[in-house]
Each structure stands twice: as structure tokens, then as C-alpha cells.
Amino acid sequence: MGLNRSTIADLVAQAEVLQLAEQRAPAAGAHSSAGRPSVGVAATEHAYVLAVDVRVSALVVARVGLGGIPLAQATAPAPADHDPAATAAAIVGLAAAVLRDAEPDSMLVGIGVSIPGIIDRERGTVRLAPNLDWRDVPFAGMLAARLDTDLRPVLGNDADLGALAEHLRGVGRGVDDLVYISGEVGVGAGIIAGGNPVSGRSGFAGEIGHLPFGDGTRGCHCGAVGCWETEIGAAAIARAVHWPSDRLTELGDHLDELASAPEQLSVIAHHLGRGLAGVVNLLNPEIIVLGGYLRALYPLIGNDVLAELDARALQVSGFRPQIMLPGLGDRSVLIGAAEVAFGRLLDDPVGCLARAHRTSALSVR
Ligand SMILES: [Zn+2]
């Protein structure tokens, strides 16, 4: 950070007063050069956020500490009809579970929620989530009311949050041009270009799942036909391996079985590589991170995907972006939701802690 030793000591002391950080004895051998050994500084678990990942198939809620450290996590199937009120109620149940072991004196400082859809972050509204069949749902307010809190949840698009988390803490650390592709029932991309998130005028830049693709004629949940999502999303994977479409939300739990059907997956590999070529030619990313179902699928079909990508992407001085799996495993989106939930604390630690909720006072607990 380019700060001198006394400035750092002062900042650490302030963070200690707020109980956000603590000094720890240096590990043996931690000082290799001459001089005083450096003291280790670590984030405490005093301040935490609730991170929520609303997927089409499941709901995941985690209590996450500073630095993106998961402290507790709970998962439940998504309500069958994705009713927003039922979804909020289920999240509250999961929140109670992850709060159970929290220290009574610890502080809830924020709530971040990932949604597979288009978000109006200012209003806390889900503008459109085709695969949940949500349109203009004021979900931040609904969830805050259910949680009985005046901490307003911060909503984010799943792929955008995945991109943010991988950029800050995953395989995209130090990479300024990356694309994170969330391949779930729907398919979307989070884009970091020049180190900055790309959101577009109305916040839906990166909806690559709905790019018109080839001569496709399949209907998409967005109302259009022939979207890329209809060729590589969960429904397409299920079709390719003859998985029953009425059990689509269970597909994610059975992806490892698909290794026995690699030839059936070649059509998915072909469409994935072709679409990625478009992403490469449009954005020239340094890395592309494949999240969601694609994380499990890619190791099975990687060679075919790369062959298709190489045949179609511009080859400039031999550069090809690296296709990578998420460094944060299946938690990229969840950790991204935690990052945005910590935003207020990082902007204004004193003010944020003054408005935060002590765990022992949370009615949901
Ligand atoms: Zn579509």
C-alpha cells in the first residue's frame, strides 16, 4: 500500500478498537530479513454479513466474515414455484441456522443477495429473472421485512457477483480483463474490463445467455427464440444426456455421472466453444471463468470446447484467453454477495457499526 510503518500501526490500532482486526504473534520463521519481526494482522469474526445465493434449484445462505471467510452455511431446495414471499421465508429459516453459532456480541453489518436476473440495485428490485418468473419484485424490502431488520439487503446479479469475487479473491486476482460465466438453468456473464465491472445503461450488460445463437428455434424463458442459453443451459444438458426435464433442478447433483456419456455431451461442447469464441472476439478477456454447472462439465469436454474456440476466435499473435474453473469453487457467487454486503462497512466502518445489529438482538435467531 506504500504506507509507512507508523501509519499502518495507527490504522491497525483503529481497526482493533472497532474489533475488526487483531494482532497475532508472527509465525516462527516469518521474518526472513534483519530487523524487528512483523506482527501478523488478521480480520476477526466480530463483523459479518449474511450472503444469499438464490438459484433456480436451491437457496444458499452463509454467514461470511471479512476477507470472504465463510463461517457457516446452510442450503435448502428452492420453493417449487419460486414464489418470492416463500423464497424470502425460506431464506429466513436458513439465516436462523447460520446465525445459531454466532457469538452473541458479534455484529451483522450487511446482507447481500445474488439473483439470477436483472437487478435495479438502487430500488432493491428484481427487474426480470426469467427462470424464476419474477418481474419487478421488490425483493430487498420483502426480505428485510421478513428478517425484521432495517439493514437493507443489497441485490446483485449472480454472474456479476461471481466475476467480482473471482476478480478479488479467486483465479482472477490481478487480472483486469475477465469474464465469469454462470452456467445454471440460465446462462449469464459478469464482465470486468480494465479492472472495472461492466453493467451497461440498464444494468444488464453480460446477458449473454440471451444472445441470438445460430439458427436456434427453441423458445427461451425470456420470450425470445434461439438464445445461447437454450443450447448450453441446464435444459440443453439434460436433453443431451436424456435427463428428465421435470427434474432439471436435480441435474446439478448428478453431473459427475455425465462422465459416462461424453459423446452425448459433444453437442454441448460445440455450442459452448462457439459461444465462447463470440465472447473472446467481443471482449478480448485475459481469462474466462466457468461457474455453475459448467464448472463440473468443462473438465469432461474441455478439449472439444477449445477446438471449437480455436476454430472461431480471432487469433492475434497466438493469444488465447485461459479458460479456468473458479478459484472459489461453487462459492464464487456467494462470496460476491458477501463482498457487496461489506461495502458499507468498508466505506464507513464507524458509521456502519453504529447502525449494525448485535447478533443477540436479532429476532430471526
Ligand atoms: Zn433468452
Image (tube, helix red, strand yellow):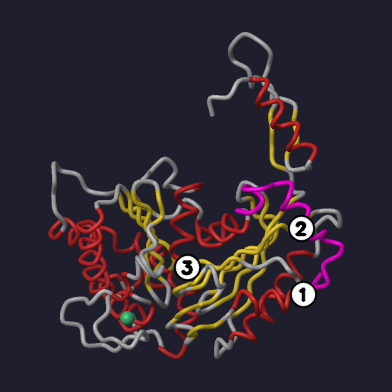
In magenta stretch: residue 347: yes
Q: Name the residue that disc number 1 marks.
A: 148
> Where's residue 238, x and y in %?
37, 81
Which of the two marks, 3 or 2, is nearer to us in this view?
2
Which of the image's four quarters has the N terminus?
A: top right
In this picture, residue 165 sits left or right of residue 295: right
Amino acid identity at mark 2: Ala
Tag 2: Cα neighbours inside 10 Å, few (<14), some, or many (≥20)? Answer: many
- Which residue is more in the foreground, 7 or 85? 7
- Quarter of the image holding residue 203? bottom left
Q: In the image, what residue occupies the spot 76% across and 52% down? A: 353
- Mark before the other along the chain sequence, 1 or 3: 1
Q: What stretch is highlighted in magenta?
A: 343-365
> Where's residue 33, x and y in %?
58, 12
In this picture, residue 125 sits left or right of residue 312: right
89 over 306 or under it: above or below: below
> Where's residue 79, x and y in %?
60, 86
Amino acid identity at mark 3: Asn
130 over 119 or under it: above or below: below
> Where's residue 288, x and y in %?
33, 55
Compute the Cα span from label 1 to label 3: 24 Å
Say if mark 1 contacts mark 3, CB within 8 Å: no
Which SS class for mark 1?
loop
Compute the Cα span from label 1 to label 2: 13 Å
Q: Name the quarter showing ligand 1.
A: bottom left
Amino acid identity at mark 1: Asp
Q: Name the residue that disc number 3 marks.
A: 157
Q: In the image, what residue occupies the spot 60% across and 64% down? A: 112
Which of the image's four quarters has the C terminus?
A: bottom right
